[in-house]
Image (tube, grey):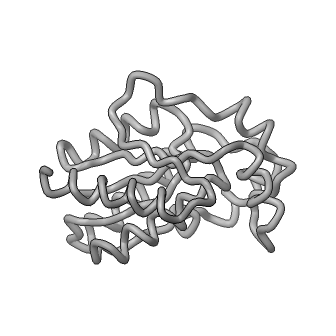
Amino acid sequence: MWYWFFGLPGSGKTHVAGIFSRLTGIPQYEGDDFQTEEDRRVIAKGAFTLKRRHDQLMRIVSTLRDSGRTDALITHPLPDKASRELVRTLNANCTQLVHVTAPLVLVRKRLHERKNHHFGPELLDAWIARHWEEPAGEDFFLIENAEEKEALVSQLDRLCGSRHGR
């Protein structure tokens, strides 16, 4: 199963996927590692396109296929329905989307605390307006990521249980 942890920048996708990786032993892939330098420049200008996003998703999928991985955790914003549908179709019935949410005030705080990251807090509002589509009516597992570690671990335990049909 490929688990795609998606959500707003700063929602805690990488952190949550890291905990899930430790619980399950499934390797984690960071979507940012698949960005080209040109992608980073375009993101900083606020001009990232759907084509660039899909090219990046194809690089991720190609790497997973080449590695022979049947289980993987991938963090990526997957901000639009078209991108979420693309990753679902590329791995047929073996894809689970995991939507990581956090209160916007916490997202902003996390973005301010990041050091040397290509996505700064000044980009968030424009990014949401231009790229983000709420996943209403889509099939995904929801993780509400706030600052209460016990609540987060409980949600991840449920995700682990769903992984085994419980």
Query: Which residue is the extreme one toward the top?
Result: 137
- Residue at position x 20%, y 50% from top? 94
Q: Residue 101 or 54: which is nearer the viewer?
A: 101
Quadrant in the rendering for residue 97? top left
Is residue 132 toward the left or the right of residue 29 in the image? right
Residue 99: x %, y % from top left: 46, 44
Is residue 99 toward the left or the right of residue 66 in the image? right
- Residue at position x 71%, y 60% from top? 40
Q: Residue 54 or 77: which is nearer the viewer?
A: 77
Q: Is residue 136 above or below residue 72?
A: above
- Residue at position x 62%, y 47% from top? 102
Residue 19: x %, y % from top left: 43, 71
Query: Which residue is the extreme one toward the right?
Result: 122
Residue 7: x %, y % from top left: 55, 46
Residue 68: x %, y % from top left: 20, 71
- Residue at position x 43%, y 69% from top? 29
Q: Is residue 161 above or below residue 86?
A: below
Quadrant in the rendering for residue 157? bottom left
Which of the image's four quarters has the N terminus?
A: bottom left
Q: Residue 146 or 140: which is nearer the viewer?
A: 146
Query: Which residue is the extreme one toward the left?
Result: 165
Question: How many numbered badges does the structure rendering display?
Answer: 0
Q: Is residue 65 above or below residue 166?
A: below
